[in-house]
Image (spheres, rainbow, N blue to C red):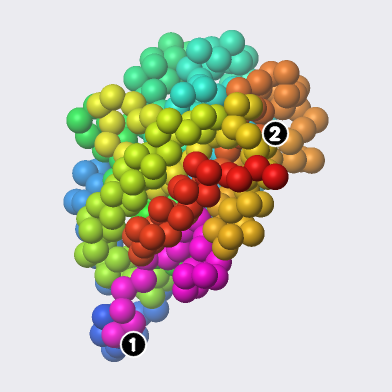
Amino acid sequence: MKVRAQNTAIYVTQPQLPPLAEFIPYLEQIWANKTLTNCGPFHQQLEQALCEYLGVKHLALFANGTLALVTALQCLRITGEVITTPYSFVATAHSLLWNGIKPVFVDIDPHSLNLDPDRIEAAITPQTTAIMPVHCYGQSCDVARIQKIADSYGLKVIYDAAHAFGVHCHGGSVLNHGDLSVLSFHATKVFNTFEGGAIVCADAKTKQHIDHLKNFGFVDEVTVIAPGINGKMSEINAAFGVLQLKGIDKALDKRRCIDARYRAALQGVTGIRCLDYGTGSKPNHSYFPILVGSEYPLERDALYEKLKDNGFHGRRYFYPLISEFPMYRGLASAAPANLPVATRVAREVICLPIYPDLAWEQVDAIADLIAHPKVP
């Protein structure tokens, strides 16, 4: 999201942009190669570099994260019903509908805001074939408990890991859990390629199948083995990713510092809750959500407007719930009574601005407005 100078609008996040001069040589190389897409040199270089950086065995790049989600479901031949969260971006559930799959919504844990493992088992039916949890805000799901449930019932697990770039749990990458993990490299993400995404998998055979699916099902010039789509990332996007990766550690460190500064400033503010990170996890600080409780002197929407009036554009992310949109609200699992925690959280949450170039003065000004709301 675009960010302007101080005293104008400050948004939740913005693309991490290196100096344009640093990108010009990459464009010149693409032009010299005369390879603009179709898994060219930068595409292959970025896949390898991301595997090394993230600590994963195999990764397939995509033009965006939604295409990656759709393809992940195709890869595992998921049908019937899939248990998922209502507290996410709509692409999570949309990818199910695009595959003719029925989403079954389950409530979230009140602390992590991730899919609540205690609720999953009760939602399993003979039609259930998979679980699609989301590592919300880069907070690792309870991967051990989810996998145990999946193993007990013979279900696949596909993680929507759009927020989870670089996140670790149990001593390794969170992306290594489940059957597949799907990343987003949209411009607002911690690591971005303007538009982009990826599927992480554990073996070369699955990676090859995914690569076929993202390229119309082609094996060679005259052989098509699957009804694939055009999900390939272009060379320009891949080259930008190669350049972005060089500065990712510095960007993540700045996010961590901003997160800590917000927490220190908001500690003890009545009615404001900052999310706690689980023990043993390494987050990426991709978002900074606060929950505005009933003890706070302003309602959530009033605080949201107050911030906006002062040039600070937070985001009520995720509000409304996916389950409240017209294409989903007719499902039995979408009933608010079935989702009390998610329903409450969606009406309390504001994600505050956080990105590497956010100045300390702006962080302090946002926190001060929250800590001293000056109620009329």
Q: Residue at x 53, y 44 (%)?
A: 372
73 and 46: which one is in front? 46
Closer to us: mark 2 or mark 1? 2
Above or below, 356 relative to 297: below
Residue 211 percent location from the top left of the image: 39, 54
Q: Residue at x 46, y 47 (%)?
A: 367
36 and 342: which one is in front? 342
258 and 236: which one is in front? 258
SS of the residue under disc 2: helix
Q: In the image, 202: left or right of 312? A: left
Residue 256 visible from this viewpoint: yes
Residue 184 percent location from the top left of the image: 44, 52
Task: Give the mark, 2 or 1, whose residue is nearer the N terminus.
Answer: 1
Please state, as top left, top right, bottom left or bottom right, where the C terminus lies in the image: top right
Q: In the image, 226: left or right of 60? A: right
Q: Which mark is residue 31?
A: 1
SS of the residue under disc 1: helix
Residue 59 lies within the magenta run:
no
| Mark 1: few/some/many CA within 10 Å (<14, 14-19, 20+) | few
Residue 68 percent location from the top left of the image: 48, 50
What residue does disc 2 label?
Answer: 323
In the rendered structure, which segment of residues is drawn in magenta?
Answer: 1-21
Measured in 3D between alpha carbons, the distance from the residue under mark 2 to the one under mark 1, in whole angstroms, is 46 Å
Instruction: Kindly check if marks 2 and 1 are in contact, taking CB atoms under 8 A apart as contact.
Output: no
- Identify residue type, mark 2: Ser
Would you identify the image quadrant in which residue 274 lies? top left
- Identify residue type, mark 1: Trp
Above or below, 38 relative to 57: below
